[in-house]
Amino acid sequence: MITANVLRNRTAGELTEGERAILEAAVLETRLLPADQVAVRQGEPVNVSILLVHGFMTRRVDAADGRRHLVGGHVPGDFVDLHAYVLKKLDHDVAALTDATVAIVPHARLERIQSECESLTRRLWFLTLQDAAIHRQWIYRLSSLNAYQRIAHFLCEINARLLAIGASDGAVFELPMTQVDLGEVCSLTNVHVNRVLRQLRENELCTVRASRVEIHDLKALVAAGQFDSQYLFLNQQTAARACGLESR
Amino acid sequence: MITANVLRNRTAGELTEGERAILEAAVLETRLLPADQVAVRQGEPVNVSILLVHGFMTRRVDAADGRRHLVGGHVPGDFVDLHAYVLKKLDHDVAALTDATVAIVPHARLERIQSECESLTRRLWFLTLQDAAIHRQWIYRLSSLNAYQRIAHFLCEINARLLAIGASDGAVFELPMTQVDLGEVCSLTNVHVNRVLRQLRENELCTVRASRVEIHDLKALVAAGQFDSQYLFLNQQTAARACGLESR
DNA sequence: CGAATAATTGACCGAAATCAATACGGGTGG
DNA sequence: CCACCCGTATTGATTTCGGTCAATTATTCG
């Protein structure tokens, strides 16, 4: 089901059957995006929004020096460029990190939802603001954590988000990101990412190796990254698992 | 007028008289906040939102090391914690930077607006997403610019935002931020901020001195900060002035 | 006027970048 | 099936930007 992961395990509660049906009906088509494909380009007018069904996507900005920086990452269930519904054009690129399946929702249908279903509208608004909360946390990560802490924090975040959609068991998950990609997220060179990952491994917090993350000591990783999942608005049980409190 | 600066000079166009009236009517009261007062505390449930009428406010996160970091800044016309209307609690503190006048809007009244005025709702949603766009730019600033560029970029941003509400003439404006504050925005120490400001002065780009900014060469400052105002969704004329194209 | 806050400057240090070289791994084509 | 490549990972040597520490000089305001 296309909307299976939308708002799954969040504080706001699951979508009602009615809401889910309306959202599913708003989907024009699903499409496959090959890895690295840019789905929405900065500044271009858009009239459809993209719901990520399978795979990973990123929001990125190309700097003047040719270096690339990520300003956001998305997992299945994220309504990746719902922002564009309101803003009409984006201030950055949205690209597929891996091969991805996306559902296309025309803005005209979102307008209909907005006039016909207040509760679903609020939910969609919530989704966009959750992104904003994540943005703020990324600012925090860059401004107050050092390299080791940043990587730890990011791994905690991605683990928590994957946990919510059942793509992590709290200890092991697939993460198709190279050390260069991790560097683009945490604003570090790949060389330094490598050194930090070695430290994390040596300290027995986690092992990150080509597309697979194994967390050995989640509590310690959470402490190292000063991670507090509050900003993800996870339901209580998921939040507890995300910070290593109850394995359940 | 309370809403005078809301969406002023943006791409979306000014509020209609009807929208403005509805928004004004939603205000419960206006209140004075003394400088440094925390208006909304992290994690606390909120049932009113704050529209900034006069003064400056900040969104900030206190790091574990006791250091404070800003994840956002607000100028008059910004609906500072409209996010809380949807999220119900915030992941950070909102505080007054200077003495500030704010208008209090109860969430119950926002709900009424949502069910009764689709166009105004879309505008409010837009406001929250504009904040998100600014967040992304702050991430960009921290991850791909060095100290000199960061300060230049921030000064361009604040100039542009103040220009939109008529609080800057494009060359001179009041900015009641100490060098420590600037450091909290750009993630630099006050010592280094001081050195960078000296450089900017020596290069004759701008003079920043206790609560007053004078831009001597806006084009050069824009270039130094690699500033592109697109993310602020300013109307054409304001955008041109913000990057020093037409002084008009 | 005097105390507190903000700005300035210098000397030194350190985390992460840069530069450089090597190893690995998996897919392709001959 | 193996040789070759190219992207990825690893490690070391060196540099640099910004931080830290410390001391001095404005400001501002009660």
Image: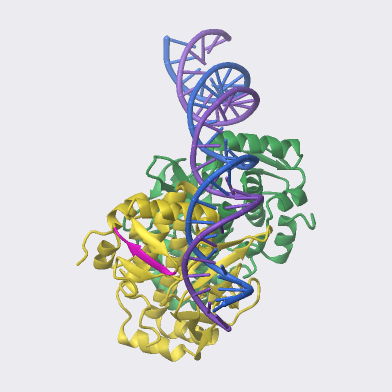
Chain colours: A green, B yellow, C blue, D purple
Location of the N terminus of chain B by quadrant is: bottom left
The image quadrant that residue B25 belongs to is bottom left
State the residue at coordinates (56%, 74%): B95
Residue A218: % across, % down: 75, 49
The image quadrant that residue B173 belongs to is bottom left
Q: What stretch is highlighted in magenta?
A: B211-216
Q: Is residue B123 left or right of residue C25?
A: left
In the image, residue A88 above or below residue A154? below
Residue C25: % across, % down: 60, 24
Q: Can residue B212 be seen in this view?
A: yes
Q: In this view, does B30 lie to the left or right of B11?
A: right
Q: Given the current orientation, which residue lies at the most extreme left position?
A: B248
State the residue at coordinates (63%, 71%): B42
Q: In this view, does A147 lie to the left or right of B193?
A: right
State the residue at coordinates (37%, 89%): B21
Q: In this view, does B204 lie to the left or right of C16?
A: left
Q: Does the magenta stretch include residue B81?
A: no
Nearer the observer, A86 or B36:
B36
Residue A35: % across, % down: 47, 40
In the image, residue B148 above or below residue B243? above
Residue B105: % across, % down: 50, 85
In the image, residue A114 above or below residue D12? below
In the image, residue A129 above or below residue B193? below
Location of the C terminus of chain B by quadrant is: bottom left
Nearer the observer, A136 or A147:
A147
Q: Does the magenta stretch mainly form a helix, a strand or a loop? A: strand
